[in-house]
Amino acid sequence: MHLGEWNLMNPTGNTILITGGGSGIGRGLAESLHALGNQVIIAGRRQKALDETTSANPGMKSLIVDMQDPVSIRALAARASAEFPSLNILINNAGIQRAENLLAQQSDLADAEATIATNLLGPMRLTAALLPHLQKQPRATVLNVSSGLAFMPMARTPTYCATKAAIHSYTVSLRAQLRSSNIEVLELIPPWVATGLGDGENNPRAMPLDKFIAEAMEILKTQPTPPEICVDNVKGFRFAAENGNFDTLFARLNATFLENH
């Protein structure tokens, strides 16, 4: 498959698994893809959130998973493959974000380890578990959700930013290794979006979730689909290093933190 061959202008036959699909960006993507006629399966650890989403979207399915637990991830992959044999799109979206004071952190690095397990090892484990199944499909896609903070770190959430930078790098390598296969590898790079992650909910400075989803979906519908899906709001962070204004934007993003520490 050549990059960009899959797009949502022709949604026939897509069966899509989305982690973290019960809230925030995951739910927004799930509902938009479901509305286009795709079979969508959302996965997450909170049954209530999954039930609320599937109830609001008849026909959508859900599966429980703990993205910090390798056994749970393998079980999700096995169950999804068995119950939905046409599964051909994986969207690795689940993530957590925690503020960390590196001068006074827990000796066991609990927050950092939980963030790495969820945001980095989780997608890697699920992708590895599903690749054999995806390779059997006529066409398939792995879409990893990173963040503008992968390219412009926010000092108060160091491990979160590091995991998103790692997801970007992993995605580039995965794309290169699968370049001659039937599997397309894409990266969605959100800006600060008004969700429960990162104190964005109801914050006027965050991009409204519905506007982000609408713009991201419009990009996904284009032909060909770009390897990186960047809405306008995130391009400043994504290309800061290339544009020579990384230091200026880093200081602006972290001004309050730097003043208080």
Image: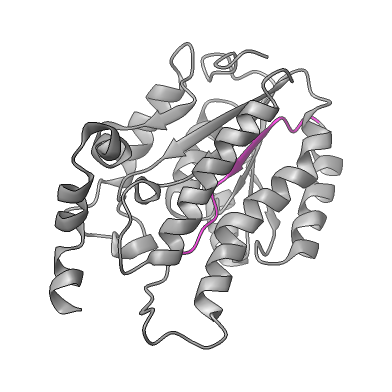
Q: Is residue 220 visible?
A: yes
Q: Left or right: 240 with respect to 13? A: left
Q: Please, what is the dominant secondary structure of the magenta stretch?
A: loop
Residue 247 vertical placement versus 189 (above, below): below
Q: Left or right: 182 with respect to 161? A: right
Q: Which quarter of the image is occupied by the N terminus?
A: top right
In the rendered image, residue 132, in percent from the top left (x then y), is placed at: 83, 35
- Please report the residue visible at 80 percent of the width from the left and 55 percent of the height from the top: 74
Front residue of this view, candidates 215 and 5: 5
Q: Which quarter of the image is occupied by the C terminus?
A: bottom left
Front residue of this view, candidates 115 and 219: 115
Residue 257 vertical placement versus 212 (above, below): below
Indicate the quadrant where residue 214 lies.
top left
In the rendered image, residue 46, in percent from the top left (x then y), is placed at: 59, 66
Residue 13 vertical placement versus 110 (above, below): above
Front residue of this view, candidates 16 and 199: 199
| Residue 187 located within the stretch drawn in magenta | no
Q: Left or right: 67 with respect to 104? A: right
Give the magenta-colored segment's residue range: 86-96
- Please report the residue visible at 74 percent of the width from the left and 33 percent of the height from the top: 87
Indicate the quadrant where residue 154 lies.
bottom left
| Residue 87 located within the stretch drawn in magenta | yes
In the rendered image, residue 9, in percent from the top left (x then y), is placed at: 51, 14
In the rendered image, residue 147, in percent from the top left (x then y), is placed at: 40, 47
- Please report the residue visible at 82 percent of the width from the left and 34 percent of the height from the top: 133
